[in-house]
Amino acid sequence: MAPSSDHPGVQAAQDPVKLIAIRDGALSLDEVFRAVGDDAAGGTALFVGTVRNHDGGADVDTLGYSSHPSAEAEMRRIAEKVVAEYPVRALAAVHRVGDLSVGDLAVVVAVSCPHRGEAFEACRKLIDDLKHEVPIWKHQKFSDGTEEWVGAC
């Protein structure tokens, strides 16, 4: 990653990918936010995905996430792609697996960059690509007794 200016306080981060994980327990906003702290970053964008109480017109009671053994490596690959495209100072992404309830945190991602616009764009790219490319599946259970599997997050 190239520095965004010649200012002496702006040095390339050694490894901007600070935290990539698949977790089977509760996620922490504080952990992800702390992971992307960087004195040369002027903007930090954080996205939190939560379990909502509905999908496709049906009431969701619970859901479960499961992942392929390659999921964490795929998350890292996507993170490195985002780092190559944007002036990322630090990046973190954590996804939950297992049984979750409405309101639980399912995914938390954060990116810090020299400026806010870059941070917003990089964070959006990160979550969108994670959702579409990482082999994580969602099994939703609805109030009417039906169930549904949804692929890739």
Image (spheres, grey):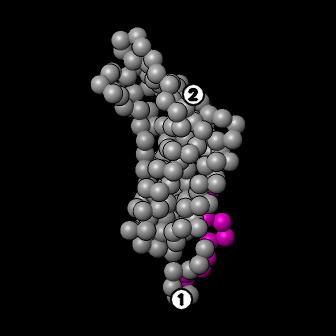
Quarter the N terminus occupies: bottom right
Q: Quadrant of residue 137?
A: top right
Observer-nearest of 79 and 148: 148
Q: Seen in the image, is 146 located left or right of residue 129?
A: left
Q: Is residue 12 above or below residue 57?
A: below
Circle 2 — which element? strand
Give the residues drawn in magenta, as a range. Answer: 9-19
Mark linked to residue 77: none
Decide which of tag 1 and tag 2 comes sooner along the chain: 1
Q: Which residue is the extreme one toward the top?
A: 145
Category of crowding for the residue at label 2, using alpha-carbon neighbours closer than 10 angstroms: few (below 14), some (14–19), many (at least 20)? some
Q: Seen in the image, is 84 located left or right of residue 121?
A: right
Q: Is residue 2 above or below residue 113?
A: below
Residue that mark 1 sits on: 6
Kindly identify the amino acid type of the residue bearing the numbered disc 1: Asp
- In whole angstroms, how far apart are the C-alphas of marks 1 and 2? 46 Å
Kindly identify the amino acid type of the residue bearing the numbered disc 2: Gly
Circle 1 — which element? loop
Q: Quadrant of residue 77?
A: bottom right
Residue that mark 2 sits on: 98
Q: Is residue 63 above or below residue 24?
A: above
